[in-house]
Amino acid sequence: MFIINYPCYECGEILKVAYIENNDGEDWFESRGGSHISASDFTATEIKIAGYYNVIINSSYSNKVKSRYNACCCKHCKAFIGNYYIFTDIFVPAMSGTFDYIEVNLENLPPELEHFENDLKNEYKKLLTESTN
Ligand SMILES: [Zn+2]
């Protein structure tokens, strides 16, 4: 999971964006419907892990798709990041050094997040079972 410091497009303060990329085709990922996952498709535990890094994920109304979904929000204003923009406008520039980010290895959580490990594994197992049935 990447935690990216993105300057909010409304107020300019740092808006923390969480995003998951699968770059090595692991099993637990096959059930996720794509190689990149934004907050709208995070599991409950992934949302908690993002929260540990001060990412605010709230149900947000998107004018683009005319419905609500979980999105990363600015803690300083009401702005949120729509799924449509994350890959091109935030993730790719972050990877090339435009925005600061940290990477959290979900398969080998740092000690401070180890208490999430079982929940996370169970969620992935469940997703995998559901996708293969
Ligand atoms: Zn803002």
Image (cartoon, rainbow, N blue to C red):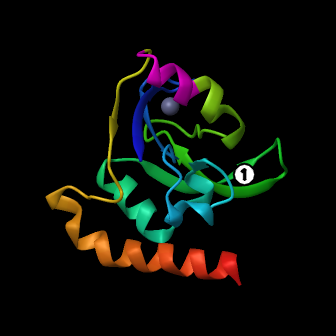
**In which quadrant will I find the C terminus?**
bottom right
Magenta-drawn stretch, dominant element (helix, strand or loop):
helix
Q: Residue at the location (41% across, 68% down)?
A: 45
Q: In the rendering, at what x and y percent does residue 53 appear? A: 31, 48
In the image, residue 106 lies in the stretch drawn in magenta: no
Residue 6 appears in the picture as rendered: yes
| Image side of residue 38 versus residue 101, left or right | right
In the image, residue 91 lies in the stretch drawn in magenta: yes
Depth check: 80 or 94 in front? 94
Residue 109 placement: quadrant: bottom left
Residue 15's place in the image compared with 44, above or below, is: above
Q: In the rendering, at what x and y percent does residue 60 appear? A: 65, 52
Depth check: 24 or 66 in front? 24
- What residue did someone put label 1 on? 61
Residue 10 appears in the picture as rendered: no
Which residues are drawn in magenta? 90-97
Residue 84 placement: quadrant: top right
Residue 63's place in the image compared with 46, above or below, is: above
Q: Residue at the location (32% across, 51% down)?
A: 105
Q: Residue at the location (42% across, 21% down)?
A: 99
- The amino acid type, in three-letter code, at marker 1 is Tyr
Residue 91's place in the image compared with 31, above or below, is: above
Depth check: 23 or 7 in front? 23
Helix, strand or loop at label 1? It is strand
Q: In the rendering, at what x and y percent does residue 55 appear? A: 40, 47
Q: In the rendering, at what x and y percent does residue 27 appear? A: 52, 65
Count of labels in the image: 1
| Image side of residue 34 versus residue 110, left or right | right
| Image side of residue 55 versus residue 113, left or right | right
Disc 1 crowd rating (10 Å Cα; few below 14, some 14-19, many 20+) is some
| Image side of residue 57 versus residue 84, left or right | left
